[in-house]
């Protein structure tokens, strides 16, 4: 009986560990789908990064459109990295990590927020301040899950 309970416990722990998502939203293309986090601020447009301009940050590969952008990010990653690890700000306000799309973005008070898609961003924008506060509170617990 103890052996069966141990196997069930081990299986449960293993499944929970596999279900955890990393702190940074990343795909095979890199952090935030391989888009340059700096161009959101400097060019007001998402731009795909290039493999020759890569920075490792928080166990993810971040790609940039230029060496200058990679250096700006390296010098102050907290300034450029999206909030909530690049996961959806709306989803985080509800306490979960959700993927994001590069064209569903907003900069609020000098911080980059990404959303699942532009429709979700529209909903998020309606109560932005309230949802940012909720998301920030949830991120403390959710970021390591």
Image (cartoon, helix red, strand yellow):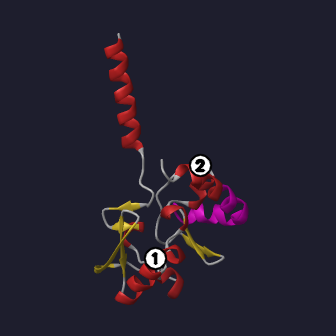
As for residue 58 lying within the magenta part, the answer is no
Disc on the earlier residue, 2 or 1: 1
Relative to the observer, which residue lies in front, 104 or 50?
50
Q: In which quarter of the image is residue 119?
A: bottom right
Q: In this view, does 98 lie to the left or right of 71?
A: right
Q: Residues within 10 Å of mark 2 (few under 14, many from 20)?
A: some
Asked if the residue at tag 1 contacts the one at tag 2, i.e. Cβ–Cβ closer than 8 Å, the answer is: no
Q: Residue furthest left?
A: 52
Task: Give coordinates of residue 98: x percent, y percent.
Answer: 49, 54
Above or below 80: residue 13: above
Relative to the observer, which residue lies in front, 45 or 10?
10
Q: Which residue lies furthest to the bottom in this view?
A: 68
Task: Give coordinates of residue 129: x percent, y percent.
Answer: 72, 65
To which residue does mark 2 refer?
95
Q: In which quarter of the image is residue 25?
A: bottom left
Q: How many labels does the image show?
A: 2
Q: Distance between the residues labelled 2 and 1?
A: 24 Å
Residue at the image point whose x is 54% and y is 63% from the top: 115
Give the magenta part as a residue range.
Answer: 116-134
Badge 1 element: loop
Residue at the image point whose x is 73% and y is 60% from the top: 130
Above or below 44: residue 128: above
To which residue does mark 1 refer?
37
Task: Give coordinates of residue 60: x percent, y percent.
Answer: 36, 65
Residue at the image point whose x is 40% and y is 43% from the top: 19
Task: Give coordinates of residue 79: x percent, y percent.
Answer: 54, 77
The disc placed on residue 116 is none
Q: Quadrant of residue 16?
A: top left
Badge 2 element: loop
Relative to the observer, which residue lies in front, 73 or 115?
73
């Amino acid at each position: 009986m103890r052996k069966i309970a141990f196997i069930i416990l081990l299986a449960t722990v293993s499944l929970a560990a596999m279900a955890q998502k990393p702190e940074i939203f990343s795909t095979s293309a890199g952090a935030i789908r391989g888009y340059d986090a700096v161009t959101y601020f400097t060019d007001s447009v998402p731009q795909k990064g290039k493999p020759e301009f890569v920075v490792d940050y928080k166990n993810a590969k971040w790609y940039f459109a230029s060496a200058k952008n990679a250096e700006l990010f390296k010098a102050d990653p907290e300034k450029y990295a999206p909030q909530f690890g690049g996961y959806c700000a709306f989803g985080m306000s509800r306490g979960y990590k959700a993927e994001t799309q590069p064209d569903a973005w907003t900069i609020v008070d000098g911080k980059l927020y990404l959303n699942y898609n532009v429709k979700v961003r529209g909903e998020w924008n309606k109560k932005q301040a309230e949802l940012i506060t909720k998301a920030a509170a949830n991120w403390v617990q959710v970021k390591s899950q």
